[in-house]
Amino acid sequence: MKYIVIIVSLCLLLISGVQKMTLDDLSLIQGLGFDPYEPGLIKGIAVSPIYEKDQPVKDDILTAVSDISRDIISDLEKQSDSPLGRGKLTTVIFNKVLAERGISEQIDALQRDPKVGSRIYLAISRNKAEEVLSKYYGRKGTPYFISSMIEQNIEYGDLPRTNLHVFLFLLNLTGGDVYLPILSLNRKDSIEIDGLALFKGQTMIGEIGRDHLFFFKLLTDGHVKGEHTVTLKEKTKAAIRSIASKRTFSLINNDIHDVKYTIKVTGIIEEYTGNKLDRKKLKGIERKFEKDIKNKCTELIHTFRDLKIDPLAISEQIEWKTGHYNKEDLYRDYDQLKVDFDVDVNITQSGVIE
């Protein structure tokens, strides 16, 4: 009993010695941004919410310039009247020009910071990160709005799954290259997802447009709930929403130079511009959608071949099946690689069919 009392007393002593800090004592950074500044310097932007009773959240914005990313937070601290907490960080935005120079230093600082969660969203911006983060979107603040926009496009749209955890996972694969969503401000000054940045290592070397996002996600995630519009004869159009999809990868005759993706998509027609939609036309829509998938996926393969990158982790999948292959092997073999797409589209619902 005496020992129990001693142990409890020691625990209470240790607890009482821990410095206590409430949320009210912190400025909780929700968004970070990085822009190129003068040669050799980087500008960091931190956004923290200011809460007022019965009022929308206001964003408090701090900026600092340094040649080392790790120094930016400490420089920002010097401007704040309270410690900067990073446990609520949701979004980190890199300007496109900076990403094309390489973001390894910033990524390293993020992954080494124990206060930063691995589920935060990373994005590339065509505009300055400061310009984007200085706008006001949503009642919960701009960083929260951007992270929610990315999340819902991953869950219910055609944006492939990505966050800091996925980025680091792909970066450390023996086969595979990373990618991040691209953000831009449109003519109405609203922010939108405008494509996907393609990386070699931690340097952006290319991109794909929003018209290829649906097909890219089919090949990476294997499932997509996005929407695609097919154009038929006489410019008749049908908007199709995918409600289920499946993708499998295989080697034909166990040949590492002969790859096949088998893709199955189940969808519904949300809009049709023609007069009547009968079963014959429905079959025509299915066949046209299959053709679009094959063509767009083939275009993606050509893009990756030209850039010598492997965002689909083809080399990793070949290694799983053969036990010996990596992305350097794929870069070498790209010109010999044959990729086929076996596509099956099934439309299960289309309103009233004649």
Image (cartoon, rainbow, N blue to C red):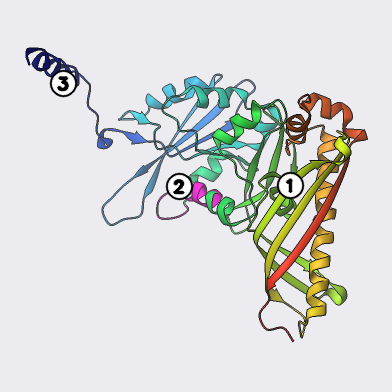
Residue 279: x %, y % from top left: 78, 79
Quadrant holding the C terminus: bottom right
Name the residue rendered at 77%, 73% in the picture. Answer: 237
Magenta span of residues: 137-150
- Disc 1 crowd rating (10 Å Cα; few below 14, some 14-19, many 20+) is few
Which of disc 3 and disc 2 is earlier in sequence? 3
Q: Is 147 colored magenta in this rendering? A: yes
The answer, for residue 63, to whether it is visible in the render is yes
* Residue under the image location 83 percent in, 43 percent down: 301
Does the magenta segment cover residue 241? no
**Kind of residue at badge 1:** Thr
Please say if 246 is above or below 329.
below
Disc 1 secondary structure class: strand
Q: Nearer the viewer, residue 22 or 99?
A: 22
User: Is residue 42 depicted above or below 257 in this figure?
Assistant: above
First in sequence, mark 2 or 1: give its number: 2
Mark 3 lies on residue: 16
Residue ID for mark 1 = 248
Disc 3: CA contacts within 10 A as few (<14), some (14-19) or many (>=20)? few
For marks 1 and 3 on the same chain, the one whose residue lies earlier in the sequence: 3
Q: What residue type is disc 3 on?
A: Ser
> Residue at point 68% right, 71% down?
348
Q: Are marks 1 and 3 in contact (CB under 8 Å)?
A: no
Image coordinates for residue 306, horizontal then vertical, percent: 86, 36
- Crowding around mark 2 (Cα neighbors within 10 Å: few <14, some 14 to 19, many 20+) is some
Percent x, y for residue 14? 19, 17
Residue to which mark 2 is pinned: 144
Nearer mark to the viewer, of 2 and 3:
3
